[in-house]
Image (cartoon, helix red, strand yellow):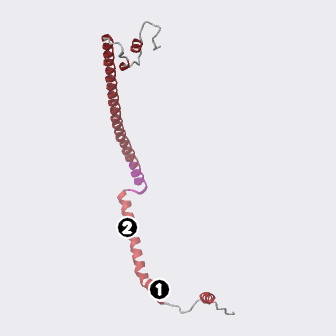
Amino acid sequence: PLLASTHDTTREEQLNKSPLSCSFSLIDRSKPNKTKNKKSIVTMAESSTGIQELMAAETRASQIVAEARIGRGDRMKQAKVEAQVLIDGYRAEKQGEFNNMVLSKGGTEGNASAKLQAETGKEIKDMESSFQKNASQAVDLLLSKCCEVSLEVPTARVRATQKAAGITVAA
C-alpha cells in the first residue's frame, strides 16, 4: 500500500500519511520544489515534537518509579514499627502471665530468691568443708603414685624385644 504508481498520489504523499513515516526519506532531490521542502520541514518538526513527548513520558515514568520506591520504603518502615509494637505487647502479656504464675506457686519473688540464695550458700559451705577434709588425703595419694616406680619389665615387653632382636627362647 505504500507504493504509488497507479494512484494519483505520489510515493512521498503516501509515506506522509503512514504512521511510521520518516521525514528524512521524503525529500526528492530530483525536482526542487519549495512546497515539498516545507512539508519535510513540518514533518521533521512533528517528529521532534514526538521525541520530546516521548522524553517527557520517560521522565514522568522514572519519577513514578522513584516515588513508588520511596513509598515502598516508607511502608516497610511503618510495618516494622507496627510489628515492634505487637511484639512488645505480646512480651508484656507473657511476662505478666509468668509473674502471676510465680506468685501463685511460690509466694513473692523476693522470698523465693532469698530461699534459693540460702540453699546455694549452704551447699557451697558443705563443698568447702569436704574439700578441706579430703585435700591432704588427695595430695598424699597423688604423691605416692608419682613417686612409685616399678622396676619390673612386663613379660609382653620382654617377648616383643626378643622377637625384634631375633632371639628365640623356649618356654
Q: Which residue is mark 2?
A: 118
Residue lying at 36% horizontally and 63% vertically, measured from the top left: 114
Q: Residues within 10 Å of mark 1 (few under 14, many from 20)?
A: few
Give the total of numbered labels. Answer: 2
Residue lying at 36% horizontally and 14% vertically, measured from the top left: 30
* Looking at the image, residue 137 lies above or below residue 124: below
The answer to which of 159 and 54 lies nearer the viewer is: 54
Q: Quadrant of residue 8?
A: top left
Magenta segment? 95-107
Q: Position of residue 116 (x, y in %)?
A: 39, 64
Callout 2, which amino acid?
Ala
Residue extending furthest right? 170
Left or right position of 164 against 125? right
* Looking at the image, residue 12 lies above or below residue 70: above
Q: CA distance from mark 1 to mark 2?
A: 35 Å
Residue lying at 31% horizontally and 23% vertically, measured from the top left: 52
* Looking at the image, residue 92 lies above or below residue 55: below
Magenta region, main secondary structure? helix
Q: Which residue is mark 1?
A: 141
Q: Secondary structure at mark 2?
A: helix
* Label located before the other in sequence (1 or 2): 2
The answer to which of 142 and 124 lies nearer the viewer is: 142
Callout 1, which amino acid?
Leu
Q: Residues within 10 Å of mark 2 (few under 14, many from 20)?
A: few
Tell me the quarter of the image containing the C terminus.
bottom right
Query: Is residue 106 part of the magenta span, yes or no?
Result: yes
The answer to which of 18 and 35 lies nearer the viewer is: 35
Q: Are marks 1 and 2 in contact (CB under 8 Å)?
A: no
Q: Position of residue 96 (x, y in %)?
A: 38, 48
